[in-house]
Amino acid sequence: MKLKDSLSFQNIQYEFRMKNLLLFSILVIAACNTSENINYDDWQVYLGDNMSSQYSGLDQINSENVTNLRVAWSYSSNDKHSGNRSQIQCNPLIIDGILYGTSAQLKLFALKGDTGEEIWTFDPFDGNYQSFGMGVNRGLMYFENGDKKRMFYSANQYLYSVDIADGTLDSGFGEGGKLDMKKGLGRDVDKLFLNSNSPGVIYGDLIIMGSRVSESTGAAPGHIRAFDVHTGEQKWMFKTIPHPGELGYDSWPKEAYQKSGGANVWAGFSLDEERGIVFCPTGSASFDFYGGDRHGSNLFANCILALDAKTGAYKWHYQTIHHDVWDKDLPAPPNLMTIMKEGKEVDVIAQITKNGFLFVLDRETGEPLYPIDEIEVPQSDLRGEKTSLTQPVPSGFPNYARTTMTEDDLADRNEEAYNYAKSIWEQSKPFHAFQPPSEEGTIIFPGFDGGGEWGGAAHDPVNDIMYINSSEMPWRTTMLEVRPQTKGEGLYNIHCGSCHGAHFEGGEMFGNVPTLVNLKERLSVEQSTTIIKGGKGVMPSFAFIDDQSAEAIYNYINGMEIDEKTLDIDWPYPYRMRGYEKLYAPDGFPMIKPPWGQLTAIDMNKREISWQIPLGEHKKIAENGMTNTGTENYGGPIVTSGNIVFIAATSDEKIRAFDSRTGKELWSSDLPAAGYATPSTYSVNGKQYVVMACGGGKLRTKSGDSYVAFSL
C-alpha cells in the first residue's frame, strides 16, 4: 500500500482490514504521525480538499446498503427565478456539523447538517438581486484561526468575509467586510465585467483569488492575486498577461499588456500545502474566437501555472493550447495525486480539459510524465489571423470522451435527424479537433462545454482511480465579416447576439437565455437600459454602454431603428461570431449518435480505462426504445471509501450512485430540479449524509432553489 498525504488513519485501517496484514498496521501507526489527518466528518474545502480530490473516507454508506438511501431533509431558499433562468452551482461546505451554501440569488446561509434547519442567512444585495449580473457561485472558502472563523465567498465584483457565528460581515476586512476585486489590477477596469464564480484557495493567512472576465472585446486582465485574510490588503499579483521584461512578454504583441484581457483563473485552484505551490488553470485570451490582434502563443493563457503560494513567484507552466481561438479554457482545478511509474511513486497533477484530453505532469517540475505530442493542425484562413502550427496532444493516458467526429457519427435514429446532420456536416469545414473558426462554419466537438467541465474530476487515492464525467455535444461556430450596419444592429451583434441569437431567439450557452422577441411588450426602454448596464441573472453587466447606445440596441431588437448605415461601432476585429449554436436535430436531440454524456473511470497506474458508461437518460427518446444515450451534464462526481461514486449533473433531474469498481448503477433518486453542481458528503453524530444543490436552469430544465440531503 502507498502512503499519501490525502489518506486518513481511518482509510489506512480500512485497507489494512481488507488485506489482513497485522505487521503493516504498526508501520501505519508510525507513519500517521507525519501524515495529514483529514476530518472526513466535515467537507471543509471546495471539492473536498486542497488537492481537488472530490474524495471522502466515509464508508457508512457503501455499495452494500446504498439502495437504502432516503431523503433525510430538504431546504428551500425560495428565491429561484420564475422564468427558469436562475441556477445553483454550489458545492457546499460542512464545518462542525453545520452546512454552508449559497442560494439561487447568491445568499449565503448556514443550516444544521442533520436537519436542514436554517441558522442564519446573509444577503449581499439586500434584496436587490436583479441588479446583479452573472449570478452563480460554485463554492466557498473557510478560514479558522483560534476563535476567528470566517466564510469567504464572491458575489458580483466583491469578495465577502462573513463571521460564521451569526452571518454578519467582518468589518475589519476590506471596506466594511467586502473587497472590491476591480481594484488593484494595475489597469482601470471599473466599467468592465469582472467577478469570481468559483472560489479561491486559502494558504496560511492568504486568500488566493482568480476571476471571471469578459470573453469579448474590452476584457479585464485575468491576473492572479493574493489578499490578507484579515484585512483584505493585496499581498501579491502574478500578471497572466506579462509586462515588458517579464517571462512570456514576447509571446504577445508589444502593447498587449495594456489592452488585452482574459488568461484568467475562473475554475478555481489546487494547492500543495507541503510544497507551498498553488496550481492555477487559466482560460483563453479575449476575444475568444479571433486572435489577429494577439499574434503569438499568448502565455499565460490556457496554462497550468505553478506559483509559490506565499509570494506569487513563478515556478513553472505548461500550455495546453497555443493561441486559443476555440474557447478551450482549462475548466477545473487539476487533481493532485501520487501514482506509480516504473515501480516508483511520483507526485503529479492531472488536468482535465474540454477536449477530453488528460494532461499528467510532474508536480515539482511541470514535465510531462509520458509523451505529449505537438501535432500539426489546420491553419486559419481568416484575414489577419495567425494560428499556431502545432497543438499539444497527450499520448500517455486515454481520452475520456470522443475527440474525433466522422460522417459515421451522424445521427441515424430517423430520416429527418440524419438529413439535418448530413446538411450541417457538408456545409461546414472538414472536422478536426483544432479546425479554426471559419466563415463556412466550424464544428466544435466534444463541444464548447464538452469533455470535462467545472464540476471537476474525482480521485480515489487508495486505488488511484480517476472518475470524470463528460458531455459529447457538437456545436458550431461561424465567423461573420463586420460590414456597414446601423448602430443598434452593430452593438447587438457584438455584445448580445452570441447568447440571445441572431434572431433574438435565446439560447443555452450560459443557461436558459431568454428570447427577446416582442421585447417592447415586456420592457420599456428605461427598464431595458437598466438591465443592459447592470446585468441580471446570468447576464453580465455592460456598464460601459451609454444610455444612447442601450436605446439603439432596444430599438434594433424591436424593429424601430432608423439610423443610417455606419461603421462607427467600437469593435476592433474584422470578424464577429454569429452566436453559440448547439447542433440539435429537429427532434430536439443531438445531431450525432449517442452517447451524449459519459462517466469514465481511469486507472492512473495502468493508464487505461477501467470502465466507461453513458450518464443520464432522455425519457422521451427512451420511451421510443433508445436507451443508454447519456445526456449533457454539468457538475461533477465525488467518490468515497464505501466504493461509491455519487453524481447528479444530468438533465433528467436525478442523482445516482455507481459502484466505483464496476460502474454498475446501484441507486438513483429524482431531484426537485436538476443538480448542476458537485455533491458533498459528511457525517453528523455518526450518521453519513450526501447533499446536493438542486438549482436547474440549464439544458432547458426548470430552475430550482433547494438543497436535498440523503442518508440511510
Image (spheres, rainbow, N blue to C red):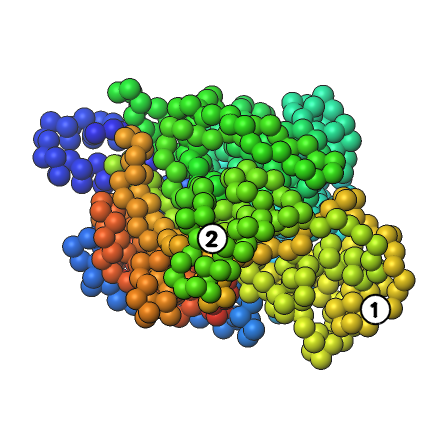
Question: How many neighbours does mark 2 have within 10 angstroms: few (below 14), some (14-19), or many (20 or more)?
Answer: many
Residue shown at 78% from the left, 64% from the top = 553
Nearest to the observer: residue 149 or residue 279 = 279
- Quarter of the picture holding the C terminus: bottom left
Q: What residue type is labelled 1?
A: Glu
x then y, percent, for residue 512: 55, 65
**Quadrant assignment, res 501:** bottom right
x then y, percent, for residue 513: 59, 64
Residue 473, disc: 2
Q: Name the residue under label 1.
A: 561
Q: In this view, does 558 lie above or below 660?
A: below
Residue shown at 87% from the left, 52% from the top = 568
Left or right: where 365 falls relative to 10: right
x then y, percent, for residue 532: 73, 63
Residue shown at 78% from the left, 31% from the top = 255
- Quarter of the picture holding the N terminus: top left
Q: Which amino acid does label 2 sit on?
A: Met
Nearest to the observer: residue 68 or residue 450 = 450
